[in-house]
Amino acid sequence: MKVEGLHIGMKVEHPHYGRGVVKSITEATAVVQFPDGARTLSPEGSGLEPVLDVPDPSLAGVSLSDLVAKAVRRTLDELGVEMPDAVVEELAARWDGGMMTLVPVDKAQQSKEIPLEVFFHKIVMMRNNLRVLEQKVNAHDKLSDADKVELQQYVTRCYGSMTTFNLLFREREGGFGGT
């Protein structure tokens, strides 16, 4: 750990001395108060690590990476962003492992194959982004009701344009509305 990463009052852990609190800092050292007394340490190379101060007892013992992963997952859930595995679960079984082939009219040009899971993921992301846009429009405090209705009509038309892809969804209600 670099000395620049420390601040007074920060909780740290040392591999030999245990947990302590930073009491003072110089250009190259820090004085840390440990249970058995204060020690002057050079943070770089000493094995000193920051300690996450967790006030919630249910989070005690949770690693920082797990805590960050949970926070990111919660944020993605609140934004309506789905992970690729969750997206593929929405794909109808008959399309699982399938390919989409784009064939140009000019036979001199090469065809392009795209795994349906990749294409489906993009379709679901469009659907999710349209849902978020719809929520933001409806919740916007500076738009008039007439403006909200007008923008909502554009979102509805986008949904209508995408109904062709509803056949890819396992559940009918997972798609873009309409039939």
Image: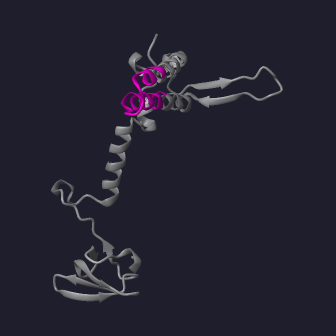
* Quadrant, the N terminus: bottom left
Residue 152, image x, y percentages: 45, 22
Measured as percent of width and height from the top left, residue 97 is found at: 53, 28
Query: Is 27 on the left-hand or right-hand side of 105?
Result: left
Q: Closer to the camera, 2 or 154? A: 154
| Residue sitting farthest toward the right | 108
126 in magenta = no
The front one of 78 and 82 is 78
Query: How many marks are shown on the rendered structure?
Result: 0
Render colour scheme: one colour
Is 56 situated left or right of 27 in this image?
A: left
Foreground: 5 or 41? 5
Residue 12 sits above or below residue 90 on the image = below
Q: Name the residue: 52% across, 30% down.
A: 117
Residue 10 coordinates in the image, percent (x, y)? 27, 74
Vertical relation: 67 (above or below) 167:
below
Which stretch is magenta?
A: 127-150
Kindly identify the residue that appears in the image at 32 percent across and 76 percent down.
7
Q: In the image, is residue 86 above or below residue 12? A: above
Going by the picture, which residue comes out furthest to the top?
Answer: 179
**Magenta region's main secondary structure?**
helix
Based on the displayed image, in which of its 4 quarters is residue 148 positioned? top left
Q: Residue 2, can we see it?
A: no
176 left or right, relative to 119: left
**The image quarter in which residue 20 lies:** bottom left
Question: Can residue 107 be seen in the rendering of this structure?
Answer: yes
Query: Is 136 inside the magenta-drawn segment?
Result: yes
Q: Position of residue 160 (x, y in %)?
A: 51, 16
Question: What residue is rendered at 62% in x and 30% in y?
Answer: 114
